[in-house]
Image (spheres, grey):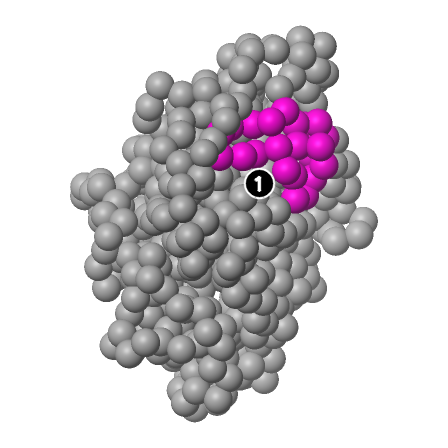
Amino acid sequence: MTRLLVGPFNRVEGDLEVRLDVADGQVRQAWVNAPMYRGFEQILQGKHPLDAMVYVPRICGICSVTQSVAAARALAAACGVVPPSNGVLLTNLMLACENAADHLTHFYLFFLPDFTREVYAGRPWHAQAQQRFSTVSGEHAREAVAVRQRWLQIMGTLGGKWPHTQSIVPGGSTRGISSSERYRLGARVAEMRSFLERVLYCAPLEEVVALRSVDALTQWHARDPLRGDLRLFLSIAQDLGLEDLGRGPDLTLSYGAFAEPAGGYAMAPGVWNGSTLQAVNIAQIAEDARHAWLADGGAALPPAVGLTLPQIDKPEAYTWNKAPRLDGQVLETGALARQLADGQPLIRVLWQRSRGNVMTRVLARSLELARLVILAEQYLRTIVPEAECCVATQLPDHADAYGLCEAARGSLGHWLSIREGRIANYQIIAPTSWNFSPRDRQGTPGALEAALVGAPVAEGDRTPVAVQHIVRSFDPCMVCTVH
């Protein structure tokens, strides 16, 4: 048995190390370490509840809108306030823009550059991968960065700046738009559609969203396997067997994405178990800190009464991340989970065939990206310029509430307790907290820890490429994980 430490990883958000036990050319066991502590939970204690809207967007520089939405929803629940339709639509537009930017960044800057490495020099697609995705010189990667920058102007317009926008509040959005602004924002959405249809898909967005069976995907890919970057990825995945790499758990979680003004969600919530979609029972969520450098209270704790107290000399601890569980079970969250909960037929068939894996995670994000741009168009058309977008709120002196949201990387929850008009407790479970969790007190590995088992590792290889593919397929955000 060989012990291998891989990290710190590049091209992930934040700090990450993975410890591997390797034998007979494959990973036998894995331990995932989030080596950075930040302590937002301690910072928030004793603050005025509305101060959360200033602090929590700064948890992360790439999903700050989502953090704001989760905090605003927790505060709105505490106040008993319902934002007006325009406020909901403006928030949804910002969420769609941020999640789409994250998916685009993951595809072009975090994930695909791995396939430009010399280890793949003999593959028939390698030259195309280098031309399109190389870190500095890749033609499509550079263009994606430029398009992303202009796309983020939508959030800058609506929020004053990005990241760490301040327009999202419990009562809705403090920033409405005029008719002329809606026109200008529509031009940015059209630019993103044009890039995706010309470069990523080489097909209309509606054609991509309509891929609903394995046969349809196979035929679409076979028409021209190198035309468009998604088809090129499918060629790479087929050649390298990425569908057999990095199998995830048998359960996935989505809180539901894009709450609609009249009720319901644009993307349905639920726990998918392979045959049925079950409602998410929030009361069954608990965090186990047995293997975290944090006080654990002697048992897994619901986040409403959770602790985030450093205990650096704790025996058997190896990460700052807790282990979230739903009714004691390990789940995977992210675009794959959202598409499964929403009933996307192609993704459900692929999941039945091989569960979550490197290929299905990236494909689910790619399909969702097309839908996010279509949703952004719909929200822009539906927003009523100059109409009310925010209502006043009255904070109670005592309250317990939570706010849920879907970030690009998956299910995000904020749990808030107010006592005597101040924050008494604030706990956050981020998407990567679920996916990159450590073992719990029963010794059950987290989703990534289990997915790494069986990954091939060549003798003497200190940075196994298969391990990196699996890690990056989850698109980790470690700064959100440790808050």
The image shows residue 179 at horizontal and vertical percentages of 67, 8
Indicate the amino acid at tag 1.
Answer: Val
Residue 27 visible in the current orientation: no
Q: Answer with the quarter of the image where residue 47 lies.
A: bottom right
The foreground one among 286 and 103 is: 286
291, above or below 323, in the image: below
Query: Is residue 267 found inside the magenta-colored segment of the image?
Result: no
Is residue 297 shown left or right of residue 479? left
Residue 1 visible in the current orientation: yes
Is residue 251 shown left or right of residue 456? left
The foreground one among 42 and 371 is: 42
Q: Secondary structure at mark 1?
A: helix
**Magenta segment range?**
151-175
Q: Answer with the quarter of the image where residue 437 lies.
A: bottom left
Q: Which residue is depicted at the point 22% across and 59% down?
A: 327
The foreground one among 408 and 420 is: 420
Is residue 220 shown left or right of residue 133? left
Q: Which residue is depicted at the point 74% across and 53% down?
A: 135
Q: Which residue is depicted at the point 50% across and 27% down?
A: 392
Q: Which residue is mark 1?
A: 65
Is the residue marked by circle 1 packed among few (<14), some (14-19), or many (20+) residues within 10 Å?
many
* Quadrant of the snapshot with the N terminus: bottom left
Is residue 270 shown left or right of residue 121? left
